[in-house]
Image (tube, helix red, strand yellow):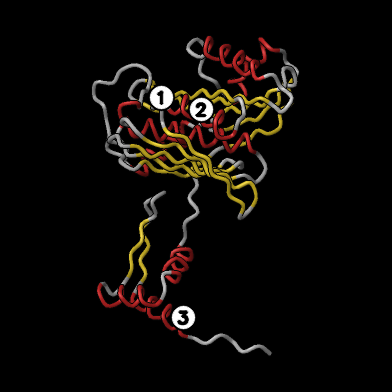
Amino acid sequence: MRDEAVRVHLKEPDLLVVGVLCAQTAQRARQIHSCMPTSAGLLAEGLAAAFGVAGLLAGQARVNLQLTCDGPVRGLFVDADAQGRARGYVKNPLVNFLAAAGPFDAGGALGRSGVLSIVRELKPGEFYRGSVPLEDFDLERDLERYFRESEQIATAVCLKVEADGPERLARVQGLFIQAMPDADPRDVERARSLVQLSRDLAPAPARALDLLRPLRDALGDEAEVQAEYPLDYVCGCSADKVMRAVLAMGRAEIEDMLAKEGRAVATCAFCNTVYQVTGEQLKALVEAIDAPDDEPN
């Protein structure tokens, strides 16, 4: 089964639904960050959630899902877009509750206070930020409250992380059910109930569209599949971006690095790639700062 997302309009009762399967992406993130099981499970939920939020927005949308907390995991950050690309990290990858059994539960890792924030970029350069304090310490429930309080849109969120033998991230999925502008918000609650009744009985889905089967069986099959696309862990870091970031630090900071270290080292938080900026490259950046602007013709 491949990682993929599907966005469907259920015409009756007028709901927008996004289904997400992302076990391979979550396993890749776990490998990159050397996550212990509890941290890996929380990051897996965060990836499924960010894919779902981006899928609801569609188009060229990009979202940052950020969670900060006072628990041992300290929080996470996931960046995802509506084309199926995501990257992320958990602040403390070494959290593991050895006594944990049954379905994944990250509540204890989140502590007793925290904030869930979502930054949406619907068009390049246009950012919208909303946030809510953590109350349930469960990403599923707190994300629903985010939609209710910050976006004022009735939305049901179902996230699931399940093991299969030694593989703790064998099944990572998300289902987002959102009322369209003319829909009855009570239909979202009805749809959520249908999903919850079937989620522990349903076989492992082969496609993201299979996640919608309980809804389509009960609510009618008049549905428009708006998009179906693969998901992947993709980091956009590069040596060129690192050089631009160093240049933006300004002459004084660059000269200080030259004097103290003779070079600069940057490690990408999303993919752990290490970039080396040599002393000669730092000197070239200083010269670029000092170079006068070209005179107009």
Looking at the image, do the residues carrying marks 1 and 2 touch, with CB atoms under 8 Å apart? yes
Label 1: which residue? 136
Circle 2 crowding by C-alpha within 10 Å: few under 14, some 14–19, many from 20: many
On screen, residue 278 versus residue 84, left or right, reads left
Residue that badge 2 annotates: 145
Q: Residue placed at 49% from the left, 38% from the top? A: 131
Q: What is the distance, in whole Å, between disc 1 and disc 2 at their CAs? A: 9 Å
Query: Label 2, label 3: how many angstroms apart (C-alpha)?
Result: 48 Å
Q: Residue 160: x percent and y percent? A: 46, 23
Mark closer to the observer (3, 1): 1
Q: Amino acid at mark 1?
A: Asp
Q: Residue at x 46, y 28 (%)?
A: 142
- Disc 2 residue type (three-letter): Arg
Residue at image mark 3? 289
Secondary structure under tag 2 reads helix
In the rendered image, residue 217, in percent from the top left (x then y), is placed at 66, 11
